[in-house]
Image (tube, grey):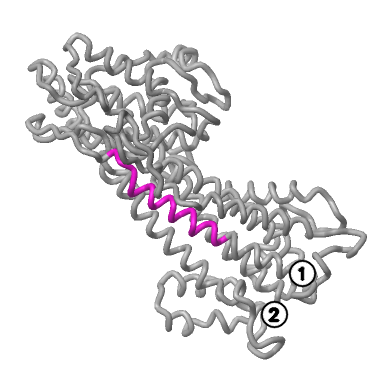
Amino acid sequence: MITLDGGSLTLEQLNKILFENAKVTPCKDAMVRVTASRGAVEKIVLDGKVVYGITTGFGKFSDVLIPVEETAALQRNLILSHACGVGEPFSERIARAMLVLRANALLKGFSGVRPILIERLLDYVNEGIHPVIPQQGSLGASGDLAPLSHLVLTLLGEGEVFYKGEKRDTASVLAEKNIIPLELKAKEGLALINGTQAMTAVGVVAYLEAEKLAYQAERIAAMTFEGLEGIVDALDEDVHIARGYKEQVEVAQRMRKLLEGSQLVTKQGEKRVQDAYSLRCIPQVHGASWQVLGYVKEKLEIEINAATDNPLIFDDGDKVISGGNFHGQPIAFAMDFLKMGMAELANISERRIERLVNPQLNDLPPFLSPKPGLQSGAMIMQYCAASLVSENKTLAHPASVDSIPSSANQEDHVSMGTIGARHAYQIIANVRRVLAIEWICSLQAVEYRGVFLSSKEMKAWYQKGRNIVETISEDRVFSKDIEALASWMKESN
């Protein structure tokens, strides 16, 4: 059981919640803060004060005063009108992340919601009730309004949810679980949707998958290193310490460990003086991607514990400030950076694939074919990798440099962070498939050289690969192998 308090959630805990289905519970002290904050909102309503989003309309309608008796209707109308997302839904894992992150933000006690809203969000997490949330439609400022509105719809008993592997009407699932739909009170609709939890949820899942993938990329690169009889001198510790980047030093260190004892690697001058960059510069390029991951992790760990709605309530309601913490620019930049860092892992991988299959660049059978000419072997797998890499280059265009004014120019600068996060996740899926192709090719190359000559670590990695895809003894439908490896890479621990 993981306790949420609004300020100490970690990516490691989220990994357990999202990938291991760990249960969650609210911190009692945090709920005391939530109750006090709610009392402040109710006093504002009773006193008839003019406060944005509590007794006024939203966005350009912020100058429209709302009568006390209509404050609940105001919140319901907000959710209904803003639930206009389109496209395919986010995965259940991302929807689950959104529930957790929204609850954690509200637990900070600056939002003025009733404790029951937080309890219901966490009930959904623990019961495996995941809202169906369309991916497209957020500008990434004023919060992820459309996606979060679809999440909130399900709290009201409307919309759809994923439950036990099926997409169902929310009302039927809540009836089955004896859960009474909520009715929103003053400020609660706004508090639930004014935030960056869609882009951040996608970013969290993307980061967790990217981190795992970066480690796998090193193992796959090490196997290619063996398959091409790479020169290990380039991995020497002194070379990397001389430059000074911690991540580069660490990649080289892990590569040396992976290749320790290998009889397939070579030394300078034995077969050639130096390797091509895609082998020689693995620590430099992969290390730079690890620098990106470090930056992204730092920003995500701030954002998952941030108060991002508007207005925020301080000093028991004596200070209520309408600010802009919902603006997604920090995460937008982080996601665009993640796109570039991960795309480069595929870029260099595809170049290693080319060196594995091109007979002009190695002494292996052309295209690793068992019968060159009659059978094409890995020829078109390289085409596929090149296509994915090219697609990544278009997806890597920064979303954060774009902005379109909205709400009659009241919201005149937006982050497009959710688009950036979605594209980052697409890139990661593409990178995984490119690396799967490299793995297939490197398995074949090492097999030609003699697996018995591999390092201990690479023998184990070879066996993992061969448990999923068999050797290329004849041409077959290789897309099945690519997808099987990619699936294992995504879901393995």
- Residue reaching furthest right? 374
**Mark 1 neighbour density, 10 Å: few (under 14) some (14–19) many (20 or more):** some
Q: How many marks?
A: 2
Report whether residue 19 is seen: yes
Q: Is residue 235 above or below residue 335?
A: below
* Lateral position of residue 377 relative to residue 5, left or right: right
**Residue at the image position 62 percent from the left and 63 percent from the top:** 349
Q: Is residue 170 above or below residue 344?
A: above
User: Hey, which quadrant is residue 103 in on the image?
Assistant: top left
> Tag 1: residue type?
Asn
- Predominant SS of the magenta segment: helix
Is residue 340 within the magenta segment?
yes
Secondary structure at badge 2 equals: loop
- The image shows residue 309 at horizontal and vertical percentages of 26, 34
Residue at horizontal 38%, vertical 23%? 82
Query: Residue 358 — which label?
Result: 1
Type of amino acid under label 2: Gln
Which mark sits nearer the N-terminus, 2 or 1?
2
> Observer-nearest residue: 74 or 105?
74
Residue at which label 2 appears: 263
> Measured from the top left, where is residue 429 in percent x and y?
58, 48
- Say which residue appears at 10% left-offset and 31% top-offset: 316
Whether residue 49 is in magenta: the answer is no
Residue extending furthest top? 69
- 289 left or right, relative to 372: left
The residue stretch that appears in magenta:
326-345
